[in-house]
Every structure is written in structure tokens, then in C-alpha cells.
Image: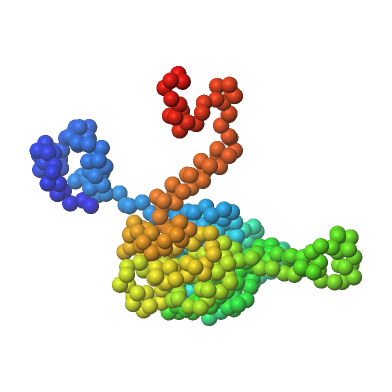
Amino acid sequence: MCVPIPEPSAQPAQMEVLDRPLTALPCANTLRTLTRTPIARKRDRRSSPLLPSAPAREGQLGFLYLPPYRVQGISVAGEQTVIQIPELDVAFDIGQCTRAVLSVPTIALSHAHMDHVGGLPYWFSQRYFQKIGGETHMPDKPDGKPRVPVGRCVCHPELEPALRGMMRAWEPLERQRTPFDIVALEPEKDLELKNNILLRGIETRHTVPSLGFSVLERRSKLKEEFRDLPQEKLRELRTRGTEITKQMEIPLVAYSGDTAPGEFLVRDEFADAKIVIAECTFFEPDHGERARTGMHLHIDDIIRMLPVWKAEAIVLVHVSRRTTIHYARERIEALAGEHAARIHLLMDHRTNRARYDAQLAKALSAANPAPAAPANTELPPRESQEEIPASSE
Ligand SMILES: [Zn+2]
Ligand SMILES: [Zn+2]
């Protein structure tokens, strides 16, 4: 802001300075002494009559440590959504290509609204340019070396042709080909993210073709009937070709993407996930209709899911900028009852920072326990000190 309007509360000395023409202004030091308090100084920096103000700092990544996973990224309805889980080698959506998301080899794209897909061509381009993900080459031009994808985007099958078209549209503009790997994932089908970790597409309900995702761990478990057998007997059964184990799927993380409520939200992949990441665009009590029109979730929809979702952590994303974090938290506290403690807002930087600092302090004290006081000088706990009667002194 560069309009030289003094604040009504400015003191006469300042008013006088501000009234003078720019050429007659005193030096910076004199100006500093005229400024009243640190708060006023900060405000003056923001709206100085001398200089236009510096731009607001760009959005900070939301961050939650939900052991053993980090959930990090940015998500604001209509602007951008990119949510990364580094430990699982995946990011959900890429409305903006943050520096952090460059390290992830797979983008699971929920749908192609601009706030979810806008960063995709840049992500492919930067991964290629910065040679991230190993040796880079054109995936469709095998050169005899092992194929190392430069990064892949997993999407609803209906989006695949248009996303390929979008990437090709850059070629005449840039006069070069950026390699890309776009993989259509049918709903109900799985794709391997890393060893025994699968990504499953789940059809959701939005204004455009859309998928939610489940990340599952595949484990083999000994069948019940063989549980009490000794090791050598099990070995013998295995060599005879008997299938002694069964495959199990452990839902780790579920991501709703943008969606209207639907029966898919009560599936095992959501009900049993350790972490549910759900959109929640609307919090105001009278915005139910708006949520239905835009095919989004309202806080009331989330509240209905709480008895079903067993997750240790429910991370709400895609909150509208119109809704303050304070108001969202207030509504959660008012509606979620005992469940409120497991609901997090990805973009609640202050609460999440305090939570992480507490986790850090706990980890530090576990790693370096305070040395115990020598036995003979050990003091009783504070409460009992207060109970010591005066006569005992
Ligand atoms: Zn969106
Ligand atoms: Zn959308």
C-alpha cells in the first residue's frame, strides 16, 4: 500500500513529517525515533507512507506428524490442494508444485479441477530438469537402459487422454519434450506404490470424474488352522505345496478428494484407515445447500462419519478461505464431542506447530532422561512437601 494517509492516532510530530513533501523528509534514523512502539514500527513497515509494502509471505506448508507418517502440504478450497505423505511415496493432488512435493514419485490425482491439477506440468518438468527420480530419459523412447519413470500421475481413466493432451500442448510452446507418465487407474483397481504398499482407486461423487484413494499395506498372515503347529511341520506343509498363509490388507491412509457424501465413505478402506484425510469445504450451519450444489463435504457430513471412522487421526483439508481456522476449530469442538481430539486441520499452523513441539520435547526427554537425584537428598514430591506439618521441622 503506498497511499500516504496517516493514521488518526499518529502523534503531531509524525503528522508533521507526513505532511512534508517527500524531498524534505528527514533521514531514516530521525524517522525511527519518531515512531512510537515496536507494534507501531511493525505496522509502519507494513503500510509505510514512503514505500509500497512488501508482498505477503507465500503460503507455508501445513504439517502434521502422525506417527509413523508425515502429512504435509497446502490445501485451500478453490485455490490449491497438494498433500504429501513422504513415507508412502505419494502425494494426493498437485494444485501447486511445492518444492517438497518434487521428491515424491507418484501423484494420485483425485480430479482435474485446476486447484488440484494446476502444478502437474511444472512437477513433470522440474523432476526432469532437476534429474529427480534417478536417470531421466523419455519413457516412450527406450534407449536400452532400465526404464526409470520421471514421475507418474495416477488418475481416473476418463482424465487420461486430456491430461496427455495437456502435456503435449507444452511441446510447441517450450520447443522440447518433457517426459511424463500418466497412468489411468480404474476404480477398485490397485497399483503398487512401493513394496507391499498399494494405492486403490475408489469412485467418488463430484461435479467431474473423480476418485478417492486408499493406501493399503499387503501382509501375509498364517492361517488360523496352522497357528499352533511347530516350525518344522509348517516347513513340511509348505514344501508339499500347501498354502499356509492368507493375504491381508491393512488400510493405512484414505483420501476423499473433493466429493459429495456417499456410501464409499463407510467402506473398510475409510472405516479402518489409520489416517483419514477428508475434504471439508463448509462449516457454517446454513451452508449445507452450498455444499450439496458444489458436491462437497460439510462439517455435518464429517460428524456423521465419526462413529464409523476408527482412524487415530482425521485430517480435514480443502477448508474455504472464507472460514477462519478459529471458527472451524470452534465448530469441531462444538459438534464432535469426544472425537474432537482426533480431528486435525492441516492448515491450522499454530496448533499443529505446538503439537509438533510437544512431540519433539517428549522425544528429546525420552532420548535424554534427566539424571536421577542422589538417593539421600531426594525430595518428596511437591504435594507431599506441602503436607509436611510445621512441627516436623
Ligand atoms: Zn477443490
Ligand atoms: Zn473440485
Q: Quadrant of residue 161?
A: bottom right
Residue positioned 59% across, 38% down in the render: 367
Whether 14 is drawn above or below 189: the answer is above
Q: Nearer the viewer, residue 211 or 350?
A: 350
Residue 12 in view (yes/no): yes
- In the shown orientation, is residue 270 left or right of residue 25? right
Question: Colour scheme of this structure image?
Answer: rainbow
Whether 160 is drawn above or below 34: the answer is below
Q: Quadrant of residue 294?
A: bottom left
Q: Position of residue 202 (x, y in %)?
A: 55, 75
Q: Nearer the viewer, residue 376 or 280?
A: 376
Q: Position of residue 209 (x, y in %)?
A: 49, 79
Numbered marks: total: 0
Residue positioned 88% across, 68% down in the render: 237
- In the shown orientation, is residue 79 left or right of residue 134? left
Residue positioned 45% across, 76% down in the render: 261
Residue positioned 53% across, 42% down in the render: 362
| Residue positioned most to the front | 391
Q: Quadrant of residue 29?
A: top left
Residue 172 in view (yes/no): no
Q: Position of residue 187 (x, y in %)?
A: 58, 78
For the C terminus, the image quarter is: top left
Q: Nearer the viewer, residue 37 or 316?
A: 316
Q: Position of residue 363 (x, y in %)?
A: 56, 42
| Residue positioned most to the top | 393
